[in-house]
Image: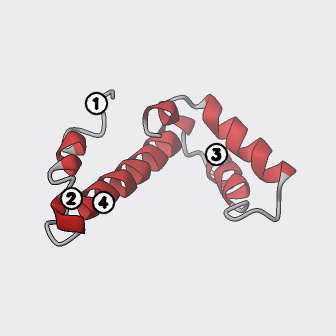
């Protein structure tokens, strides 16, 4: 979920998919990426922002699952797997 987003070609895939399915949830992301690129934001920076957001979502989910108050804490510490630099490769 995280590492594929370090390839700028993924942005082209996102844009194309949003054009193919304009009524899908978040279909407005494709045009937003196009506007950011047109405004001079580098594809690498956009990928870094998306990758960071994905990292935070995954980390937050794993942290919540590892909460001692959730399901007798069967997965305690699972979030620790994500507690490294977002630049790390998994």
> In the rendered image, which residue does mark 3 sit on?
37
- Which secondary structure, mark 3? helix
Dots 3, 2 in contact, CB < 8 A: no
Please identify, in this view, whether the residue under mark 1 or under mark 4 is nearer the observer. Answer: 4
Most foreground residue, 79 or 14: 79
The disc label shown at residue 66, or none: 2
- Which secondary structure, mark 2? loop
Q: Earlier in the sequence, mark 4 or mark 2?
A: 4
The disc label shown at residue 60, or none: 4
Please identify, in this view, whether the residue under mark 3 or under mark 2 is nearer the observer. Answer: 2
Q: Earlier in the sequence, mark 3 or mark 2?
A: 3
Q: Is residue 18 above or below residue 5?
A: below
Q: Quadrant of residue 90?
A: top left
| CA distance separating discs 3 and 2 | 38 Å
Residue farthest along the right direction in this orientation: 20
Q: Is residue 14 left or right of residue 60?
A: right
> In the rendered image, which residue does mark 1 sit on?
88
Dots 3, 4 in contact, CB < 8 A: no
Q: Earlier in the sequence, mark 1 or mark 4?
A: 4
Please identify, in this view, whether the residue under mark 3 or under mark 4 is nearer the observer. Answer: 4
| CA distance separating discs 3 and 1 | 26 Å
Q: Earlier in the sequence, mark 3 or mark 1?
A: 3
Tag 1: Cα neighbours inside 10 Å, few (<14), some, or many (≥20)? few
| CA distance separating discs 4 and 2 | 10 Å
- Which secondary structure, mark 1? loop
Q: Is residue 26 above or below residue 52?
A: below
């Amino acid at each position: 979920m995280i590492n594929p987003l370090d390839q700028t070609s993924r942005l082209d895939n996102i844009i194309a998919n949003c054009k193919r399915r304009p009524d899908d949830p978040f279909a407005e992301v494709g045009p937003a990426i196009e506007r950011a690129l047109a405004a001079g934001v580098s594809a690498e920076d956009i990928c870094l922002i998306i990758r960071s957001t994905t990292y935070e979502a995954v980390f937050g989910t794993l942290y919540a699952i590892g909460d001692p108050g959730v399901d007798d804490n069967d997965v305690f510490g699972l979030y620790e797997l994500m507690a490294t630099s977002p630049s790390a490769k998994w």
